[in-house]
Image: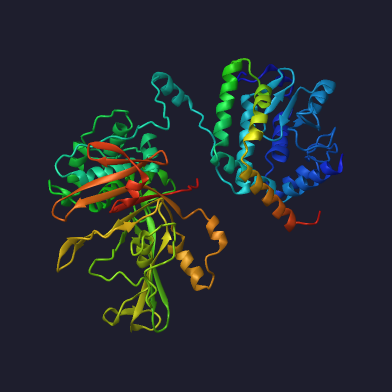
């Protein structure tokens, strides 16, 4: 099985062989358009004038049995029943192509052979077919480039990832009330797309000084996936955060949510170099609203705000980017129930499979409240473009575009004028979350009278899986942050600064929940 | 050709023409990866290769070793689902 093919192909590689081979691949192997599909069934390719009825065996008429096409003439034969072998022997046509997978078989070598040039043609035709079908790029297995082969040879040490492997898990030393930072670091280092970005060295730094936070993150990922089990001391990260987000400096306990937003902001700003590179056509790459950096690709969603004038019913819509959704909780000074004007709160429906012991609030309840229409009241009239005067209106928020990673922030810390306290109401959250009911598109369908169709259940675009939870124990004055993170699809670990312990799903779902990180279940390649 | 295989061929032609065959292939592919079938067979392939030796094994060897196991390991639920899809398709395009 030599990668350089066999010598018997040389007899084939004469005249216009490349074009002939392409036609075979286009018409019979990777048939893409309706035209070629029909041709596959009805007639032979245009290049050959012989009559070819259809893609069935010329000897027995079957279409299963691993049909092969002779490369030298128009003949289809079963492989399993050896019909193509007979043809090869009789006509001395030594090469045939497997119509199912495109492999080239040599009857002299009696095996499939791999000829670089022929493989190249096969691959190109397959890509073309995918493009015509509208499939775009499909997943293909990795083939190392020359440089990569070199690197692999120079670095022979390999690490094997098994299902019980704990690589990627590492404790973080608390440098003085830095548990708020440690939890966010745990969540970020276990965000799959972010991890893939950093481990494949995709950051090309443009900053002159040593203060690039993205570079530091890259270092952090190296530390986490190094296989070392001793806790890591993130003093450089802490220092960089203090440098770039002054308001977080100092040894006081900070808010983990604030840290998350500040960290994403700095990373986003420092990713400028990567973003510019991605946008070759000279677009405004450093426009903060049109950035294509990894942070934006993963975390940025679009929140739609519709303001409806109560008089003329004109709707004014704006869409704002967001990195997280902050949700009010029952027990705060703003009333939680009912979820929609006109009553009907306190749910009884189980959306997203959450089981709530009577009375307990769910994440879905919070999201419903977040996306409910809200009367803005006579004290907050908006200037209506249709009426040209100030009118009462309702405002409603829905999701226009969902990020790949959705972060929900339960507003447990109340800082109103009257009091400062922590709301400890238990909110149950699910492992799998379907965001469809909260999308702007769903709202439009509802308004047009179309209720959730059965087809929506098949729509996988809005399905999310929980992968990290940040919890706060204690009071507003003194508390401690810990986190749960998911490894290997169904294994959870509790990260308490330097101590990592195995956790059960129950532990995770029973926890109070402060920051909830969900990851899209199905990703599409662009 | 027996009546059975005639019918098979006709159905196959229709499936190809309407692009349904490709869709079914994709569905099947996804289901078999999901239920771990692909991984199981991959492991079996590796065993066969190890047994026969990398320099001597041919595709034929692998096909002969894997085919029976592969057929047996397809979950019933997957078979049912595909059958249902094909039935539904035929019901829709009943001009056969």
* Residue positioned 46% across, 60% down in the render: A436
Q: Position of residue A81 (x, y in %)?
A: 79, 28
Against A11, residue A166 (above or below) is below
* Residue positioned 42% across, 56% down in the render: A402
- Among the 4 quarters of the image, the one containing residue A341: bottom left
Q: Position of residue A335 (x, y in %)?
A: 27, 71
Query: Viewer-proximal residue, A337 or A48?
Result: A337
Against A150, residue A370 (above or below) is below
Q: Quadrant of the N terminus of chain A?
A: top right
Look at the image and tell me whether residue A521 can be seen: yes
- Among the 4 quarters of the image, the one containing residue A231: top left
Look at the image and tell me whether residue A468 can be seen: no
Q: Position of residue A494 (x, y in %)?
A: 29, 41
Q: Is residue A112 left or right of residue A172?
A: right
| Total number of numbered discs in the rendering | 0
Against A315, residue A63 (above or below) is above
Query: Viewer-proximal residue, A346 or A407?
Result: A346
* Residue positioned 69% across, 23% down in the render: B60
* Residue positioned 25% across, 66% down in the render: A331
Query: Viewer-proximal residue, A34 or B1?
Result: B1
């Amino acid at each position: 099985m030599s990668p350089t093919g066999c010598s018997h192909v040389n007899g084939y590689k004469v005249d216009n062989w490349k074009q002939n081979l392409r036609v075979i691949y286009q018409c019979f192997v990777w048939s893409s358009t309706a035209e070629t599909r029909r041709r596959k069934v009805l007639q032979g390719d245009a290049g050959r004038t012989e009559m070819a009825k259809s893609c069935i065996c010329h000897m027995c008429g079957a279409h299963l049995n691993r049909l092969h096409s002779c490369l030298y003439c128009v003949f289809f034969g079963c492989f399993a029943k050896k019909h193509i072998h007979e043809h090869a022997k009789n006509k001395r046509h030594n090469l045939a192509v497997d119509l199912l997978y495109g492999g080239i078989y040599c009857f002299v070598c009696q095996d499939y052979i791999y000829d670089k040039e022929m493989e190249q043609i096969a691959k190109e035709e397959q890509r073309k077919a995918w493009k015509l079908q509208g499939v775009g790029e499909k997943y293909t297995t990795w083939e190392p480039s020359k440089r990569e082969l070199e690197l692999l040879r120079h670095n022979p040490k390999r690490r094997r990832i098994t299902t019980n492997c704990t690589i990627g898990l590492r404790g973080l030393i608390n440098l003085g009330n830095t548990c708020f930072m440690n939890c966010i670091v745990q969540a970020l280092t276990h965000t799959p797309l972010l991890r893939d970005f950093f481990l494949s060295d995709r950051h090309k730094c443009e900053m002159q000084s040593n203060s690039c936070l993205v570079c530091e993150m890259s270092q952090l990922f190296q530390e986490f996936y190094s296989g070392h089990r001793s806790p890591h001391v993130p003093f450089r990260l802490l220092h960089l955060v203090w440098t770039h987000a002054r308001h977080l400096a100092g040894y006081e306990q900070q808010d983990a949510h604030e840290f998350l937003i500040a960290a994403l902001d700095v990373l986003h700003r420092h990713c400028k170099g990567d973003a510019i590179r991605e946008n070759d056509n000279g677009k405004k790459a450093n426009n903060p609203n049109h950035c294509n950096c990894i942070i934006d690709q993963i975390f940025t969603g679009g929140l739609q705000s519709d303001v409806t004038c109560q008089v003329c019913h004109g709707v004014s819509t704006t869409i704002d980017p967001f990195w997280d959704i902050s949700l009010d909780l029952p027990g705060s000074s703003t009333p939680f129930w009912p979820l929609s004007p006109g009553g009907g709160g306190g749910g009884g429906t189980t959306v997203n499979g959450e089981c709530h012991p009577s009375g307990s609030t769910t994440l879905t309840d919070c999201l419903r409240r977040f996306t409910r229409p809200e009367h803005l009241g006579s004290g907050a009239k908006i200037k209506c473009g249709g009426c040209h005067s100030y009118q009462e209106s309702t405002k409603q928020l829905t999701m226009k575009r969902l990020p790949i990673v959705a972060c929900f922030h339960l507003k447990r810390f109340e800082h109103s004028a009257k009091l400062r306290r922590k709301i400890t109401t238990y909110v149950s959250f699910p492992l799998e979350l379907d965001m469809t009911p909260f999308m702007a598109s769903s709202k439009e369908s509802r308004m047009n009278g179309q209720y959730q169709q059965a087809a929506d259940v098949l729509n996988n675009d809005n399905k999310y899986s929980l992968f990290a939870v940040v919890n706060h124990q204690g009071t507003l004055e003194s508390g401690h942050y810990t986190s749960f993170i998911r490894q290997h699809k169904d294994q959870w670990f509790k990260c308490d600064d330097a101590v990592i312990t195995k956790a059960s799903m129950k532990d995770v779902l029973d926890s109070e929940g402060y920051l909830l990180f969900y990851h899209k279940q199905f990703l599409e390649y662009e | 050709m027996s009546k059975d295989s005639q019918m098979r061929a006709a159905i196959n032609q229709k499936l190809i023409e309407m692009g349904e065959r490709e869709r079914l292939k994709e569905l099947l592919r996804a289901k078999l990866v999901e239920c771990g079938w692909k991984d199981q067979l991959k492991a079996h392939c590796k065993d066969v290769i190890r047994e026969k030796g990398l320099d001597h094994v041919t595709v034929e060897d692998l096909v002969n070793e894997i085919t029976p196991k592969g057929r047996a390991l397809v979950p019933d639920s997957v078979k049912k689902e595909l059958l249902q899809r094909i039935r539904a398709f035929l019901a829709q395009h009943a001009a056969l």
